[in-house]
Image (cartoon, coloured by chain):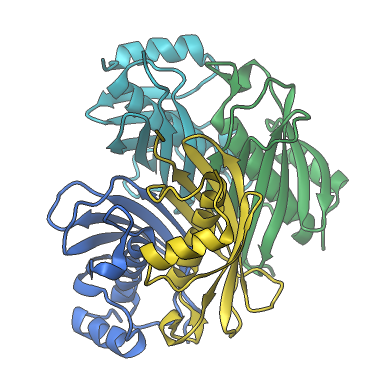
Chain colours: A yellow, B blue, C green, D cyan
Amino acid sequence: MPANREQLIAFFAKDFPQAKCQIISVGNRSAVVTHPVGVEELRPGGTVSGPTMMTLADVALYVAILGEIGIVPLTVTTSFNINFLRRPQPAQFIRGESRLLKMGKSLVVGEVTIYSGDDPTPVAHATGTYSIPPQQ
Amino acid sequence: MPANREQLIAFFAKDFPQAKCQIISVGNRSAVVTHPVGVEELRPGGTVSGPTMMTLADVALYVAILGEIGIVPLTVTTSFNINFLRRPQPAQFIRGESRLLKMGKSLVVGEVTIYSGDDPTPVAHATGTYSIPPQQ
Amino acid sequence: MPANREQLIAFFAKDFPQAKCQIISVGNRSAVVTHPVGVEELRPGGTVSGPTMMTLADVALYVAILGEIGIVPLTVTTSFNINFLRRPQPAQFIRGESRLLKMGKSLVVGEVTIYSGDDPTPVAHATGTYSIPPQQ
Amino acid sequence: MPANREQLIAFFAKDFPQAKCQIISVGNRSAVVTHPVGVEELRPGGTVSGPTMMTLADVALYVAILGEIGIVPLTVTTSFNINFLRRPQPAQFIRGESRLLKMGKSLVVGEVTIYSGDDPTPVAHATGTYSIPPQQ
């Protein structure tokens, strides 16, 4: 059974207490997640670090998947690819919009587009594949 | 001119104060970097989170590149791909060994193999491409 | 200056005489290209071979780029990533719809979704980065 | 049970009659495969086309896998990533050397380095993941 936004927020607060991502919406094989941009997320040149964007993309896909299959924590990333498109303009957060391309029983594939603040031009694009453990 | 380990450690301490990676060695188009594994790096199931491994891989490649070209902070990741091979056994750190496959004037490509603690079986493998800004 | 469909068809006929792809449309940073499916494109199990889909994706991106910058034959792929989503249903052709995500002066990034025949469910999704040579 | 070189050559001749690749060696979770370079494989500028290198890499991984698990034709590529490192020097063939990084029951991950003729500098590097169907 699917998990809704409230259930996912509770799951992250309990199992990923260090995660900074905020779940804005989830459903229909997609999710919108944001990550605040502070001193820790910046790198020389005042731009958002690559690993911050990778973290956001991975979480945005994970949330979209759990939104479909429910809280199956052992769902894991098997491969991940990201292209950085342009340096993010300074903003207080980055936003990842994920969409599942294939929802198989054991393998899921999805894509994420990342934006900086309210700028409509994407700053990065990622795809990931996830393995769902066999369920009893 | 290349940068040595001491120079890179000083650069990271100053420009990436939040980074947890430790530079073990650098030179010959390669680097060895470790990342401690604590509560923040774990995820449900007691395994190391994907974003922690992505961060380590990205830093291990960045260090190998700066080891060749010197401290050019605006060197940026343009694309990154990672395959997760197996769940890391519990250990106090993960280790990334990077190697540059192509060292061009403006584009660099490298690969990284990630290990958990002293286990000789790799837990992840990544490749990345980096853009070096034109130098005066 | 951009190249239109007729110019691109003529360029492919002359410079890639062995290519089997057909350019259906091009423009607005996108392209639609098809590849016939015959005995040569099939693999055991009666499905379309992976390399056939990779070829189609690469051509669909290359066409979208030349549609923007004109016939610059030395534009080359620098990296390419593809996820296979499901086995294509038997059909007489596969179709790639490409879209450029970033159109830089020297680096272009785009994505392609691949369909089999008239089935609206995608069978593969690819991203690629391309390098444009400096122009006089 | 594993398949040896002769069995794999016979399988390719029968099931992939159009394939141009030659299996040089296979075993120990690795393979060496070559692809001839003729007019069909060249592209403007006299260099080897990207899809030719992708085809070679995919076959080199597939051969290494079947070398371990035997002739399981329905083993399929699930994702594939390639970085092009430099333009191949003119040569009569390109050579792919593959190595499996993970040999799971249902998922295999491997990497391939591609060389042109006898030049020891790699021209491309690829990684791929493959799905093995459940076996009776």
**Closest to the observer: B1 or A130?**
A130
Whether residue D15 is visible to the viewer of this picture, yes or no, is yes
Image coordinates of residue B108 in percent, x first then y, are: 42, 64
Q: Is residue A62 above or below residue D81?
A: below
**Closest to the observer: A14 or A95?**
A14
Whether residue B78 is visible to the viewer of this picture, yes or no, is no
| Residue A118 shown left or right of residue D79 in the figure | right
| Residue occupying the point 22% across, 80% down | B4
**Closest to the observer: C103 or B24?**
B24
* Extreme-left residue of the structure: B118
Label total for image: 0
The answer to which quarter of the image holds residue C67 is bottom right
The answer to which quarter of the image holds residue C21 is top right
| Residue C93 shown left or right of residue D133 in the figure | right
Q: Is residue D19 above or below residue B49?
A: above
| Residue B136 shown left or right of residue C57 in the figure | left
| Residue occupying the point 37% across, 58% down | B50
Query: For the N terminus of chain B, which image quadrant?
Result: bottom left
The answer to which quarter of the image holds residue A84 is bottom right
Q: Is residue D66 above or below residue B135?
A: above
Image coordinates of residue C79 in percent, x first then y, are: 52, 53
Q: Is residue A100 above or below residue A46?
A: above
Image coordinates of residue C5 in percent, x first then y, are: 85, 46
| Residue occupying the point 36% across, 67% down | B55
